Image: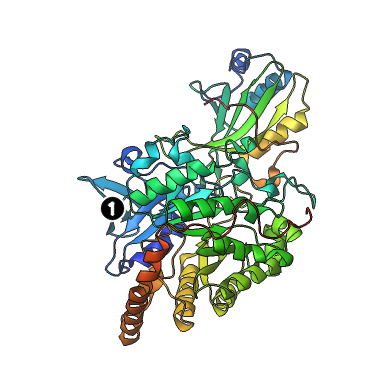
Amino acid sequence: MAAPLNPCELEIDLFCRGVRIDPSCSLESDARIFRRTRAGLGSGLELVLPGDLKDVWMNAPVEEDFVQASPYRLVKDAERYALVDERGPVRYPVRIPPEPAWYERLTGRGTPMRDVGVLQGTYLGIYISNSCGYWWMRGEGKEALNCAFCTTGYNVGVNERAEKAVEDVVEVAAAAKAEGCTFTHFNTGYHGGRDIDLVAPYVAAVKGRVGQLVGVQALPARAPDLWKYDWLLDLGANHFSFCWEFHSPDWFARLCPGKRATLGQDAFFRALEYCQSKMPKGACSGEIIAGVEPIEWTLRAIDDITDRGAFPTVCIFRPCIGSDMEHVPPPRPEDMLVVMRHMYEACRRKGIPIGAAPNIEVSLIVQPDDARYLEPRNLRFWGREARSWIVRRLAAPVFARELRLRPPKADPYHPPRPQPAAV
Amino acid sequence: MVLDGSSATGVLAERVGGRFLAVEALLGRLASGPESFVVDPSAAGLDWSVENQVRGVPNRARVKCFSPKEDALLVWFYKRSALSWSRERFSYGGVLLDAKEVSPSTIDGWIRYQVGGFSPEERPPGMRRSFPFDLPA
């Protein structure tokens, strides 16, 4: 019989195989509401896998067809949840994070708060617009130039241009903060080069009126507009992430036709380099999807990201229901273990701080500090743990300062330089 | 309700909410084809699944025909949530038609798309990804 998996190995296995829900479960009352969010990665079940180093948060696939063949079954027994691995007599206790109280509340404008933002792990994710332009662009013989793994364009309400009111966002971020949330992450689809201008008022409002760490994930600014990141920093941004998804230029071109046609892969590298050069090590991230292109490319992506002083955000490919890649099989857990070990080693070797920010657990990915479970518990491991502890202590006052209200140092509605010519 | 040669297709066609030649042709094809289609009488409109497997697992692809407004017919392709209590539905888009006749090859294309589990390679031409009206359950 195989040995039980540690929390990170289990997380990886679950990302690759999903989990079936036993009729004994009462997730409709015990769990956070299931919602297909824009790209689809957060559409599964939020789970916490307890462990001695840290609890691992993840969003396990439940809706996709491949899940029907999963050996994992979630059961509820005497008010406790566990994962049963039907390949052997192994049972993993898990926690189901409850729905936050504010999900049921309305903002002052009458908007259901859960329609404004969602908790993905412990951070608040807010999509500032309901539409990505790639779904509305035709070309190259395709009916749309959306990324092949994405499901954004199928979401209900996509024609309503459901942009979020700044007031609503402030109320939701404040409600989330009151329940312990420290980080609000904004992201957007493609908006014809105006992406950063659109996100700026939200960054300023949350930083200035709520006092949280603020992250931005938008399509990268073109080279002449990189100064806009300085503007966002003045408004209070703490983190930027850049998603080029696939490191191989061929895979990138094939699966991200909109990004290729409008920006090109280099725009992502350039923007990451620019932002990271202005921020503390590990403040920015490069985001890639593992399990589609050959893993040599994924390993190279991790090296390139960490060489730039950023941390790698590695999503395990999920063939989301309804996406163009729905019928592509999920990756093999063995391959993903190789990738995550490499991610952890690269961060450690290059001194990228991991797990330093307070209470930020991202359920959509294997976080670099989740991968601590993959390293043998030897002297080197404990030495690295000691260094991490020191970094956390040193960083604590910095984060405490960032969690206070900070008035913006710039006008969020008027960029300090003229707008570029229309794209 | 499994569709076969003895099914009352005329009665089923009325579920759509209007008379559409495309629906009559479609029902004729569903009832006479080699695949086994199952109509859900509790669903709004004319809503059916197919009893086959795709890549080793049961096919969840569903089709719903209904009339969102006078003289308009939507043939909508979707999947239901795998969770029994969830009302979530996953849209793959649909074809919006008027009351005119539709070619047998077009209908075959819709059925092929469903039987194949909505494989992107079989995606019918003329599909719309979103609609300016509600899709009834």
Quadrant for residue B47, please give it: top right
In the depicted view, which residue is nearer to us: A72 or A249? A249
Identify the residue under disc 1: A82
Whether residue A296 sits left or right of residue A356 in the image: it is right
Q: Give the percent coordinates (x, y) of residue A280.
A: 50, 74
Q: What element carries label 1?
A: strand
Q: Is residue A274 visible?
A: yes
Residue name at image x 72 percent, y 44 percent: A136
Quadrant for residue A123, please give it: bottom left
Identify the residue at the far left of this view.
A78
Q: Give the percent coordinates (x, y) of residue B136.
A: 55, 25
Determine the chain carrying the residue at label 1.
A
Q: What residue type is labelled 1?
A: Ala
- Quadrant of the drawing holding the C terminus of chain A: bottom right
Residue name at image x 45 percent, y 70 percent: A337
Whether residue A75 sits left or right of residue A421 in the image: it is left
In the depicted view, which residue is nearer to us: B103 or B123? B123
- Quadrant of the drawing holding the N terminus of chain A: bottom left
Q: Can residue B82 be seen in this view?
A: no
